[in-house]
Image: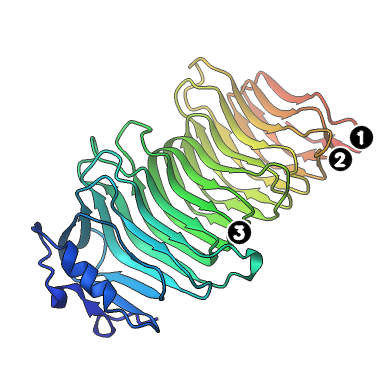
Amino acid sequence: MPQTNADCLNVKDFGAHGNGSKDDTAAVERAFAAIPRSGGCIYFPRGTYELRRQIGSRDRSVTVLGDGPDVSNIRWTNPRGGMSFSFDNVNTNLTITGLSLLTRTSGGGKAIRARWPDIGSSTFGACSINQVEIRGVNGFSHYWNEGIVIENGWNTILDAIWIRGRANTLDSDYAVRLGGNSTNTAMSRINISFAKTGIEVTGATEGTNIDQCYVLYTNYGVRAHLTNQVRPYLTVKSSHFDVLNAGITTQGRPQSFFDSNLIYRRENHAFTGISLGDGCQDTHVTNNMIVDPEPDTPGSKNGLVITGTAGRPVTSCHLLGNKFTAMDTGIWLKPYSSRLLVANNLFTNCGTRILNQGATSGERIHHNF
């Protein structure tokens, strides 16, 4: 795909003004319609482009390129704005870079939605979104319902992205939602604030890597629940979550790794730092810090909770080198958890360090302080 301005279709050549006052919808639609069947690039030079409808493509690869966030701005005035790419071909590629995507409404829809056909692990369309800002024009009244939605993507890279909901509220549902049969997804340097869920991983997704992300004022930092089946390899590392209910909560995600994250409890809600649900066997939880920075606030708070079921126990997990501060319970091993290695964890001002209610066979619990 072309990556330089000279290779692209310039929306101003199709009549766009980019002055923030005139309606550029028709001009931008003409530019998208002019993309060759073999694929092409749309360029938004410096300016603010006022749009009143969704833009996107269905049948060809596309790069959408700007000069940088807060430099090239696309602003929607209607409740159903954003970019929508519902591709017909599994081999279609998508790149979005160097833009601010703004909504001037309360509940602007999905800022970016990209969907490929659902044919399981044979999907080959690649997606790269980087250097993108997603927010409302007025941060105290305008917001997107969802920031980025990827369905059935293959080899997706999300990097250096800022997603902000309505300030001090949880009106936005998800900042990032990954679903369908998405495989091999890398998320890094994503800065999220003010949403119900920071990163939601749903469906039969496999091979998701989340690294160096920052999630502030959400109910959940990363939520990855899968019932009645399992899909392996979810990694969350070197990230900071400042959340109301849970930093990382998983179900049906075996062979996963949660390492070197800093998780803060915010306000007085019932809180769990990391939760491993049924089907999360062979998971490593290492070197995380889980802290209540205001320990006198009311509400239950637990550091690491393991909860299996009779049909899908949590087994063969390593819980090593984590630090828990001001938790009611540092590590809570509920029923149907077994064959766990729990060692070298540190506890400061915790009511109960380790509560073992179900780990009954093959455990190694030692050298915890």
**Horizontal and vertical percent position of residue 342:** 78, 38
Q: Name the secondary structure under disc 2.
A: loop
Note whether 297 is above or below 309 in the view shown: above
Note whether 121 is above or below 228 in the view shown: below
**Horizontal and vertical percent position of residue 111:** 34, 53
Q: Nearer the viewer, mark 3 or mark 2?
A: 3
Among all residues in the image, which is located at the extreme right? 361
CB contact under 8 Å: marks 1 and 2: yes
Q: Which residue is mark 1?
A: 361
Q: Report the front residue among 235 and 181.
A: 181
Q: Earlier in the sequence, mark 3 or mark 2?
A: 3
Q: Earlier in the sequence, mark 1 or mark 3?
A: 3
The amino acid type of the residue labelled 2 equals Arg
On the rendered structure, is 94 left or right of 286? left
Q: Name the residue at 58% across, 62% down.
A: 118
The amino acid type of the residue labelled 1 equals Ser
Q: Which residue is mark 2?
A: 339
Q: Nearer the viewer, mark 1 or mark 3?
A: 3
Could you tell me which quadrant the N terminus lies in?
A: bottom left
Quadrant of res 73: bottom left
Q: Name the secondary structure under disc 1.
A: loop
